[in-house]
Image (spheres, rainbow, N blue to C red):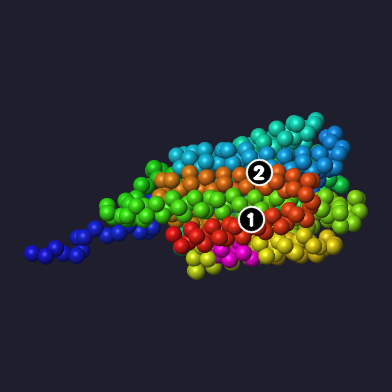
């Protein structure tokens, strides 16, 4: 006698299973809004330091131009070193205790350390405090873990793109504020203002973020059969490794330019009294371009596939990087940085989307933490390499090296897609 089809077990779906995403289906939209605002606020506070960081290093007693460039690179990159070291730990903690506590920890920790940076007496204290900020901070990274695991998979590219837009908007406004604020309240006062902005993000996170973490994260059944081939079982590891390397190289290539921008602009004939303001405008150019296209490229990744978006953005960014080595005035550089930002915008949301879809739910926070660690590793090495190349080889050479790295990443992504 045949069995009735009605009693056969049905596949689980986001609407009926007990996954983390299903339990938070009614929260993710509100959480996305708060995380966008919180990422915007914290990134304003972090990026506003970029235009006056070399000036602050000089104020702390470093006089040589070469040493200012090198110490600025160290002070800039050491924050990301701290975050790279602890991001996987915070990802594991998010899988175990929930995403919201990680957001609160990051916001409060960053607010405290930021206020202390404004009281540094020498460049060594500045570097140590920025390292501490990286160890305990990372609000935007914690937001990616929360939104990346709560949003439905078919909308993850768009949601991560929107979240990226908030961070990029902070990166856009921050350098502009950093170019103007020191003239009003001084460099040390600017750090106090940054701490106050991050404290606002902490309050909003505590009051409005909602999360259902009532049960352990689900361990789903394997998607492949018992007889799956070795190549099939290795495919996720190959994809994850390629994505992590690509994220590292993308951030390395992008951030290698940041420490030398102020000095590079000075070589273009900008007067010293306008240097901080012009540097803020140029640095904001890439964030402005990315803010225009991040959500759209994220949605494009949902439609045509994230690998295609990654490869296309890498090649386009490499091509846009080359003309930046030949500019003769600052406004041309600002325009090119804006175009570069438009092409870069789709990379990290697409990479995060692929990582989220490749790993099991109970490892999602941990793997997104490794992704953040890979990105920040690139942000650590990038400024150091850019500073060294700028000092010993020449400022313009940094752009050529960056372009070559991006083309290498495109080749790696194409190989991983074929696997």
Which residue is denoted by mark 2 in the rendering? 380
Which residue ends up furthest to the front in the rendered image?
Answer: 393
Which residue ends up furthest to the left in the rendered image?
Answer: 1
Which residue is denoted by mark 1 in the rendering? 405
Q: Compared to 62, does 297 lie above or below? A: below
The quadrant holding residue 334 is bottom right
Q: Residues within 10 Å of mark 1 (few under 14, many from 20)?
A: some
Image x and y of residue 352, in percent:
52, 54
Relative to 301, is 194 on the left or the right?
A: right
* Mark pair 1, 2: CA separation: 16 Å
Image x and y of residue 140, in percent:
60, 48
Residue drawn at (91%, 50%) of the image:
273
Residue drawn at (80%, 30%) of the image:
121
The quadrant holding residue 194 is top right
Relative to 213, is 256 on the left or the right?
A: right
SS at circle 2: helix
SS at circle 1: helix
Q: Is residue 206 visible?
A: no
Q: Compared to 304, does 31 lie above or below? A: above
Relative to 36, is 225 on the left or the right?
A: left
Q: Which mark is residue 271?
A: none
The answer to whether mark 1 and mark 2 are in CB contact below 8 A is: no
Residue drawn at (70%, 37%) of the image:
130
Tell which tag, 1 or 2, sits nearer the viewer: 1
Image x and y of residue 413, in percent:
53, 59
Which residue is at the front of the view, 269 or 408? Answer: 408
Residue drawn at (57%, 60%) of the image:
410
Which residue is at the front of the view, 200 or 130? Answer: 130
Of labels 1 and 2, earlier in sequence is: 2
Magenta range is 309-316
Q: Main secondary structure of the magenta part?
A: helix
């Amino acid at each position: 006698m045949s069995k009735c089809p009605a009693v056969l077990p049905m596949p689980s779906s986001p609407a009926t299973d007990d996954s983390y995403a299903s339990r938070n289906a009614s929260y993710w939209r509100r959480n996305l809004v708060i995380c966008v605002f919180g990422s915007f606020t914290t990134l304003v506070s972090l990026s506003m330091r970029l235009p006056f960081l070399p000036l602050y290093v000089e104020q702390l007693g470093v006089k040589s131009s070469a040493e200012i460039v090198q110490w600025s690179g160290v002070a800039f990159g050491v924050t990301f070193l701290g975050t790279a070291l602890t991001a996987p730990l915070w990802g594991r903690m998010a899988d175990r205790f929930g995403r919201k506590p990680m957001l609160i920890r990051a916001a409060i920790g960053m607010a405290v350390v930021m206020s202390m940076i404004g009281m540094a007496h020498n460049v060594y204290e500045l570097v140590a405090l920025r390292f501490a900020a990286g160890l305990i901070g990372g609000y935007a990274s914690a937001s990616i873990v929360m939104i990346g695991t709560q949003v439905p998979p078919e909308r993850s590219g768009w949601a991560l793109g929107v979240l990226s837009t908030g961070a990029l908007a902070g990166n856009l406004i921050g350098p502009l504020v950093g170019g103007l604020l020191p003239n009003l309240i001084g460099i040390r006062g600017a750090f106090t203002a940054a701490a106050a902005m991050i404290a606002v993000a902490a309050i909003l996170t505590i009051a409005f973020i909602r999360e259902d973490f009532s049960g352990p994260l689900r361990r789903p059944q394997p998607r492949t059969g018992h007889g799956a081939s070795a190549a099939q079982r290795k495919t996720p590891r190959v994809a994850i490794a390629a994505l992590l390397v690509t994220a590292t190289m993308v951030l390395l290539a992008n951030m290698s330019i940041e420490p030398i921008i102020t000095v590079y602009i000075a070589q273009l004939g900008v007067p010293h009294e306008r240097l901080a303001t012009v540097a803020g405008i140029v640095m904001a150019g890439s964030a402005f371009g990315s803010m225009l296209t991040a959500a759209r490229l994220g949605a494009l990744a949902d439609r045509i596939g994230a690998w295609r978006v990654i490869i296309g953005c890498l090649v386009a960014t490499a091509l846009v990087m080359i003309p930046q080595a030949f500019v003769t005035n600052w406004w041309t550089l600002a325009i090119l940085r804006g175009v570069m930002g438009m092409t870069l915008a789709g990379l990290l949301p697409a990479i995060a989307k692929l990582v989220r879809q490749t790993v099991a739910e109970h490892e999602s926070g941990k793997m997104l933490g490794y992704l953040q660690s890979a990105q920040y590793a690139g942000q650590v090495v990038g400024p150091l390499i850019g500073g060294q190349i700028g000092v010993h080889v020449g400022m313009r050479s940094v752009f050529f090296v960056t372009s070559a790295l991006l083309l290498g990443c495109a080749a790696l992504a194409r190989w991983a897609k074929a696997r």
